[in-house]
Amino acid sequence: MQKYEHLADDILEVMSLSDSDRINTLFSDRWIGYKKAVTILDTLTDLLNRPRKIRPECLLIVGDSNMGKTTIIHEFTKQYYIKTVNDIDMELLSVKKPVLTILAPAKANVKELYINILNHFFVPFRPTDPEAKLRNQAVHLMRKYETKMLIIDEIHNCLTGSTKLLSEVMNTLKNLSNDLSLNIVGVGTREAVTILHTDAQYASRFDVAMLPKWELDQDFLRLLLSYVRLLPLKKRSDLASQRLATLIFEISGGNFGDLNRLLIECAKEAIVQGNEEITEEIVHKFKWLKPTEGMRNIRNINLNVV
């Protein structure tokens, strides 16, 4: 079997697949532990491992759209979502859920917040029940499963709606945090920081971790080298060369999601063409992939690409 020394060990088994199957693997979710992502993971782990306290620390993770925030949270949640505890003396096996990750309601709504929490416990409940009953169920389950951290993705959704409704949601989170010694982690776009400015007590509870766009620096080059190891190509692509790295950066605009999409499309093209490496010519072919620029940007698919 041919050796592919430039590839990571877990990618080697992919190389025995057909071209079409290798292309399909390109579109699978992948975790790249780059420096900024690992720093956020370490921050979350440190927060989770701290002892419970009367006024738990809370965190807001923000960044532009398509920067990989949800991927980082997913990677963290995989490690801590379920914890099995085996009590040998009592001959019992108990399950804990130290970390609970939910989506924020589509707009600021306390009842929907409780419903989203309850959905993650897979227990029967009636969404039509009064808000107070839903709260009691949610609190009971989080106590029962010893939930320590509640992560709310897309928390900027709560900016949709009146200031009164936003205050109700934030006060609900504050009360849950106090009642259960719960670390609250919000994840959203830069606009989510606005929530903290609506009340001084919110700002005093939340630290902010910013996930910025990439710069054309050594960290970006290391990220490109990670892709060299993870993309199932038979030849080593010189992505970190000055010309190629600069071109890739200019097309992606420093946006992680756009960079990922660009390199996947280029890798696919390299397999289809048969040259098995990402070249400057291939990258130029996909310069029509525009970077994410907020909600006004709509991706246009170039149907004229040959």
Image: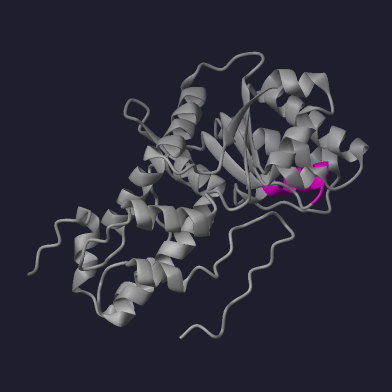
Seen at 30% across and 76% down, the residue is: 271
Residue most extreme to the top: 54
* Residue range highlighted in magenta: 107-116
Q: Is residue 94 visible?
A: no
Is residue 131 toward the left or the right of residue 91 in the image?
right
**Residue drawn at x 81%, y 19% as measured from the top left:** 200
- Residue at 80% x, 27% y is 197
Q: Residue at x 47, y 53 (%)?
A: 249
Residue 236 pos. (x, y %): 22, 61
Q: Is residue 24 above or below residue 158?
A: below
Q: Can residue 19 be found in the magenta stretch?
A: no
Measured as percent of width and height from the top left, residue 13 is found at: 20, 65
Q: Where does the image place residue 279, in percent across and percent down from the top left?
A: 32, 67
| Quadrant into which the N terminus falls | bottom left
Q: Nearer the viewer, residue 185 or 239?
A: 239
Q: Where is residue 184 drawn, in percent x and y?
A: 64, 30
Q: Nearer the viewer, residue 131 or 159?
A: 159
Which quadrant of the figure has residue 190?
A: top right
Reply above or below: 222 against 305. Answer: above
Closer to us: 259 or 83: 259
Q: Quadrant of the C terminus?
A: bottom left
Residue furthest left in the image = 1
Does residue 115 belong to the magenta stretch?
Answer: yes
Q: Is residue 65 visible?
A: yes
Q: Main secondary structure of the magenta part?
A: helix
